[in-house]
Image (cartoon, rainbow, N blue to C red):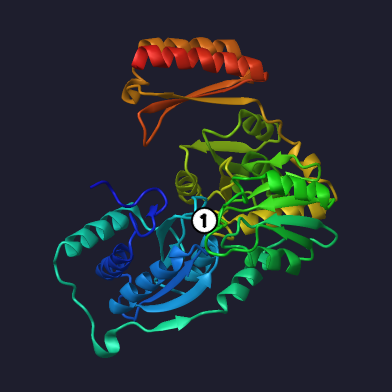
Amino acid sequence: MGRLFGTDGVRGVANADLTAEMALGLSVAAAHVLAEAGTFAGHKPKAVVGRDPRASGEFLEAAVVAGLASAGVDVLRVGVLPTPAVAYLTGALGADLGVMLSASHNAMPDNGIKFFARGGHKLADELEDRIEAVYEEHRTGAPWDRPTGAGVGRVHEYAEGFDQYIAHLVGVLPNRLDGLKIVLDEAHGAASRVSPEAFARAGAEVITIGAEPDGLNINDGYGSTHLDKLKAAVVEHDADLGIAHDGDADRCLAVDHTGEEVDGDQILSVLALAMRERSALRSDTVVATVMSNLGFKLAMEREGIQVVQTAVGDRYVLEEMKAHGYALGGEQSGHVIVLDHATTGDGTLTGLLLAARVAGTGRSLKELAGVMERLPQVLINVPDVDKSRVRDSADVTAAVAEAERELGTTGRVLLRPSGTEPLVRVMVEAADLEQAKAVAGRLADVVKSALG
């Protein structure tokens, strides 16, 4: 079988790929592996467990809680909260383990399990591999060493987590949001209560859409992957800006007062300048991925801010930030990490900081986001090719070099083999959309003929 753990935990169709038995087994395995690693040495272990509002999260949460308690772990159930809230509470409550049940921006039938280590940080890959191996060993018949009597875990509801997390968010803001009217699109997801409450406590006038989760409607036509309703609502209500989250609220995209999208690159630009003013942007550096728009990099260079680029994926951004002590990083998709205040992408925190910059400067989001100009970006997926040869093909190399000469300093070419499919992604940026389309089309043709 393939590796269960992907880049963001274990995901699949709930009750088909991801069953109650798997959730229970992985939780017991996680408890045993962490005990072997010495995480629980000298004390009764404690875990924080939360979920998004998917219907399947109800039975999967029950399975996870049962697994942990049966392995001797005390459990604090925090209920429906964003992924970054579970990460934060894992650290704030001194828990040895955090578990979040969510499939983020995926459609409702999917669900997932993500484990956090002590402090609210992502588990190391080697621990995930060990959990998977132990789970598989016991799934096929090896008996567990089970505690009895007073050794079993106890389960407690921890409703205080809601207020504790909101107090944390509001407490880190550099200024209040009084005078701002903000539309929040909650994707019928995990932040449907948290985000409106946090913005309101910070002083904003709040209008919500997509904030009525029923267990079945998460990400359905609302949220950061469906911005049309938010754009319309911002204009209709004459709001200063709009904020959109995904299902587990680790992402944030925005809309300015005219209804125009403000993407993750633009949000990073605004926050980078704000943090530098407060001497909070360590090394005057921001971390982004190779898919960030060239306009972002050019804008940051013009402002005297260094951009360090990583492979695509917020896990790689976070690794680079932690390795070098950088304070800000993120992706075009809206995963933004402010490492001084969060151990993972936090969409509510990002939205609050963005709104605080608008309120603090008295400038519109449109003006602030104008610090960078998004260059036209064209992406073509070339299927049914030998992606392993993309870096070794002389024809492809020559075509890329020719394209780069044509684009000069005002454009960029990126060829990426897909991590999951037999295809190559051809991305071209240029000052002119038609030029970007033409160059991307020519490169795609070369990739198809050379690698097909």
Q: Look at mark 1 in the image and give the residue it sits on.
A: 344
> Residue 191: which quarter of the image?
bottom right
x, y (%) of residue 435? 63, 15
x, y (%) of residue 12? 38, 52
Q: Compared with residue 366, is residue 338 higher up or lower down, i.e. above or below?
A: below
> Residue 131: which quarter of the image?
bottom left
Residue found 35% across the figure and 77% down from its top = 45
Q: Quadrant of the C terminus?
A: top left
From the viewer's perspective, tell me whether residue 125 is left or right of residue 299: left
Q: Is residue 279 visible?
A: no
From the viewer's perspective, tell me whether residue 371 is left or right of residue 420: right
x, y (%) of residue 441? 52, 15
Q: Nearer the viewer, residue 360 or 229?
A: 229
Crowd class of label 1 (few under 14; some 14 to 19; many from 20; radius 10 Å): many
Residue found 57% across the figure and 42% down from its top = 333
**Amino acid at circle 1:** Thr
Q: Compared with residue 279, is residue 205 higher up or lower down, i.e. above or below?
A: below
Q: Compared with residue 269, is residue 237 higher up or lower down, i.e. above or below?
A: below
Question: Which residue extends farthest left?
Answer: 142
Q: Is residue 451 visible?
A: yes
From the viewer's perspective, tell me whether residue 191 is left or right of residue 323: right
Q: Nearer the viewer, residue 141 or 201?
A: 141
Q: Nearer the viewer, residue 394 or 226?
A: 226
Q: How many labels were placed on the picture?
A: 1
Residue found 37% across the figure and 33% down from its top = 421
Element marked by disc 1? loop
